[in-house]
Amino acid sequence: MTAGSPLTVIRSSLAQLSTTEARLGVTATLVVVAVGIALLFAPWVVRRIARELDERVLSNSRVPDLVSDARWILPPSVIVRTLQAAIFLSTGLAILVVWGREDLAVTIVALLVSLTPVAGKVLMTAGLFVGAYVGIDALESWLTSYAAESDQINEHQEGIVFRVLQLVMLTAVTLATLAVWDAEVGNLLVGAGFLGIVVGMAARQTLGSFIAGFVLMFSRPFEIGDWVEIDGEEGIVSDVTIINTRLRNFDGETVVFPNDRVTNATITNRTRRDQLRLSVDVGVDYETDLDVAVGVAEAALEDVDVVADVPAPNVLPTTFGDSAVGLKVRFWIKHPSAPRRAKANAAVVRAIKAAFDGRGIKIPYPQRELQSREETSGFVVRSGDTENQETPKTVSTSE
């Protein structure tokens, strides 16, 4: 070692600190300098650099918004605290040397050096997860923008695609983290495979619903807000997840279907074409002229606002009932919904009833004719008094 090396100079300087008063003076000087640098100079420098970075770099229009929005990941306060910790640690080591504890200072430095690889792995792990968080946020923004501009993906598909991509990204980051920490990824994958088999056998229905969720995503039989009937249950689709589908029925109840049941059920979507045909049955007396009744009913439908003009409503005789000739009134409504359907049916019934009453067309009550056979000479009517019973009367009646 040369005579002018830094270590020789330090040792020769420390040899002069033979008295306690000298060491106390040096210690006090070190503490004052450390406090001044850590509490005053370091925060000022960090804030100045951050301000220059914002004004000259991040505010530039060529810098992506993602970089500007990611400033919160490493705020100036974290940098200041890190610098302060480094300053106080260095000051503490220097004080140990001043008081003749070079061996302890060397041990601490050696320990810090040995922890450097671990610290590097911790920083790399933190960087991976921070990058994943930023990437997921950017992915969500891009997917939302794409869905808003495209008709090829709906809200349900957007949610499922985002969750799948999010899961893929987190899985990739987890595997990268395991590689950073020198973990045996192959053995973990084998164990995960066996665990997947066990979980798959124990949760077959859940996995079936999970797969059915993807089938619904691509087949798109309905969307959120549609008025549908699934397996006999009618309502508005309120939510579609990877596992289940929720309907809000017209009694205010929420009906939950597993997606595997939805894919195997008959689905009726009443809002897909934005129009719906309804029908109302009405009967007229057998003595009524059917052409007149049909014309009166069709004219009555023209004055109902909720009934669509195109396609035009029509009325057809359909059945010979016990008491009346049946007419089927068929009409269309736009923007179908359950309240609109109920309103249209009620309006059509009122309009036809008023029109028939105005033209004297009878909507008969249920009735039945009773008639005897000729060979029996009619019905025999007996009174309740059997003692003073008169000669039975034979009559032919109809009711």
Image (cartoon, rainbow, N blue to C red):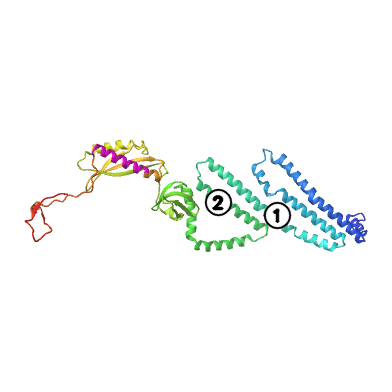
Could you say whether the residue bearing mark 1 is in a helix, strand or loop?
helix
Relative placement, left or right, of 61 versus 105 is: left
For label 2, the crowd category at 10 Å Cα-Cα, with few meaning under 14, some 14 to 19 and many 20 or more, is some
Instruction: Let me know if residue 201 is in the magenta part.
Output: no
Q: Residue at x 82, y 61 (%)?
A: 106
Name which residue type carries label 1: Leu
Q: Earlier in the sequence, mark 1 or mark 2?
A: 1
Q: Position of residue 115 (x, y in %)?
A: 75, 59
Residue situated in front as seen by the camera: 363 or 249: 363
Q: Which mark is residue 123?
A: 1
18 is higher (above) or lower (below) than 128 = below
Residue situated in front as seen by the camera: 382 or 198: 382
Q: Which mark is residue 240?
A: none
Relative placement, left or right, of 103 versus 157 is: right
Q: Residue at x 64, y 42 (%)?
A: 65
For label 1, the crowd category at 10 Å Cα-Cα, with few meaning under 14, some 14 to 19 and many 20 or more, is few
Q: Are marks 1 and 2 in contact (CB under 8 Å)?
A: no
Instruction: Let me know if residue 358 is in the magenta part.
Output: yes
Tag count: 2
Magenta residue span: 343-360
Q: Position of residue 347 (x, y in %)?
A: 34, 41
Could you say whether the residue bearing mark 2 is in a helix, strand or loop?
helix
Q: Position of residue 223 (x, y in %)?
A: 46, 47
Q: Which mark is residue 163?
A: 2
Can residue 1 be seen by looking at this rendering? no
Q: Position of residue 153 (x, y in %)?
A: 51, 44
Q: Residue at x 54, y 61 (%)?
A: 196
Name which residue type carries label 2: Arg
Q: CA distance from mark 1 to mark 2?
A: 27 Å
